[in-house]
């Protein structure tokens, strides 16, 4: 079942909060809640904008390309590097399990990019 925008964001928040060694806050603006692992951003949730109920996550470039081909509501990252980030909005095929998988993968990519001493165990 496809998620609505606010549900997509809630699933992303719950998933990120359940991962070890994460923190969240508003380092950019009061409308962008950001999750980090070992100081590296892995999830941005756009808040307070009903026209832009999206999440933005890290993705391998080839995976991001494939996801954009499969889902009309997945686009290049709205805020960050367009090659390594994707933005996901509500749309056909955007399910709870897809969002959970995307958050998990983004977390893994961010943690892998951090110094070994800073990574969660």
Image (tube, rainbow, N blue to C red):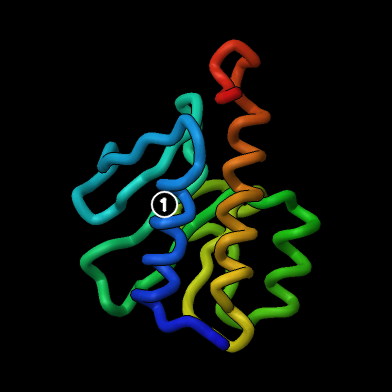
Q: Secondary structure at mark 1?
A: strand
Q: Along the line of sight, which residue is nearer the eye, 87 or 12?
A: 12
Examine the rendered structure and indicate whether residue 72 appears above or below residue 84.
below
Q: In the image, is residue 58 above or below residue 76?
A: above
Residue 92 image position (x, y, % from top left) = 59, 88
State how many labels appear. 1
- Residue 39, image x, y percentages: 45, 26
Q: Residue shown at 54%/16% (left/top)?
A: 118
Task: Point out residue 71 in the picture as x, y percentages from the top left corner.
Answer: 66, 80
User: Which residue is rendered at x = 27% and y = 77% of the image?
Assistant: 50
Q: Quadrant of residue 24?
A: top left
Residue at (63, 69) in percent of width and height: 98
Q: Quadrant of the N terminus?
A: bottom right
**Quarter the C terminus occupies:** top right
x then y, percent, for residue 57: 54, 53
Mark 1 Cα shell of 10 Å, populated few (<14), some (14-19), many (≥20): many
User: Which residue ends up furthest to the top in the rendered image?
Assistant: 117
In the displayed structure, 55 sits above or below 17; it is: below
Q: Residue at x 61, y 16 (%)?
A: 115
Image-based side of 115 in relation to 30, left or right: right
Q: Which of these two is toward me, 92 or 16?
A: 16
Residue at label 1? 44
- Looking at the picture, tell me which residue is in the foreground, 90 or 81: 90
């Amino acid at each position: 079942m496809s998620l609505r925008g606010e549900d997509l964001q809630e699933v992303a928040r719950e998933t990120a909060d359940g991962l070890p060694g994460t923190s969240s806050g508003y380092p950019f603006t009061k409308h962008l809640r950001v999750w980090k692992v070992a100081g590296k951003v892995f999830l941005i949730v756009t808040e307070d904008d009903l026209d832009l109920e999206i999440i933005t996550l890290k993705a391998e470039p080839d995976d991001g390309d494939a996801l954009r081909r499969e889902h009309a509501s997945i686009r290049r990252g709205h805020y960050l590097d367009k090659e390594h980030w994707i933005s996901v909005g509500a749309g056909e095929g955007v399910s709870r399990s897809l969002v959970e998988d995307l958050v998990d993968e983004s977390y893994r990519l961010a943690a892998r990019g951090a110094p070994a001493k800073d990574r969660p165990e």
